[in-house]
């Protein structure tokens, strides 16, 4: 996903962690830490993990407001 397409991400779209990192302008390890801290994600099977953009951003904003 290029920087231009990151700005056009559909809020309900499911994305991989590297795509979410680009959209949120953070590193992949930061996404991993957020996930461990409770950021919502979707799994299929044992290994396929995707993030709903709107849910991930809403969670991060809530954490920021709470001072976490």
Image (cartoon, rainbow, N blue to C red):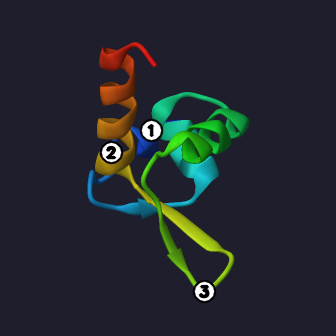
In the image, is residue 66 above or below residue 16? above
- For the view shown, which residue lies furthest in the right direction? 29
| Residue at x-position 35% and y-position 38% | 59
* Residues tagged 3 and 2 counted as in contact (Cβ below 8 A): no
Nearer the observer, 55 or 38? 38
- For the view shown, which residue lies furthest in the top direction? 67
Left or right: where does residue 54 sit relative to residue 41? left
Quick one: label 2, few (<14), some, or many (20+) residues within 10 Å?
few
Left or right: where does residue 9 sit relative to residue 68? left
- Residue identifier under label 1: 4
Quick one: label 3, few (<14), some, or many (20+) residues within 10 Å?
few
Of labels 3 and 1, earlier in sequence is: 1
How far apart marks 3 and 2 lie (CA) works out to 29 Å
* Residues tagged 3 and 1 counted as in contact (Cβ below 8 A): no
Coordinates of residue 60 in the picture (x, y in percent)? 40, 32
* Residues tagged 1 and 2 counted as in contact (Cβ below 8 A): yes
- Residue identifier under label 2: 8
Coordinates of residue 24 in the picture (x, y in percent)? 47, 33
| Residue at x-position 56% and y-position 38% | 34
Which mark is nearer the camera, 3 or 2? Answer: 3
How far apart marks 3 and 1 lie (CA) works out to 31 Å
Give the quarter of the image for residue 16: bottom right
- Residue identifier under label 3: 45
Residue at disc 1, secondary structure: helix
| Residue at x-position 65% and y-position 37% | 33
Nearer the observer, 56 or 65? 65
Coordinates of residue 66 in the picture (x, y in percent)? 33, 18
């Amino acid at each position: 996903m290029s920087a231009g397409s990151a700005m056009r991400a559909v809020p309900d779209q499911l994305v991989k962690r590297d795509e979410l990192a680009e959209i949120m302008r953070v590193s992949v390890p930061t996404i991993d830490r957020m996930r461990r801290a409770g950021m919502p994600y979707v799994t299929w099977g044992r290994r396929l993990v995707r993030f709903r953009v709107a849910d991930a951003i809403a969670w991060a904003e809530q954490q920021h407001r709470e001072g976490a």
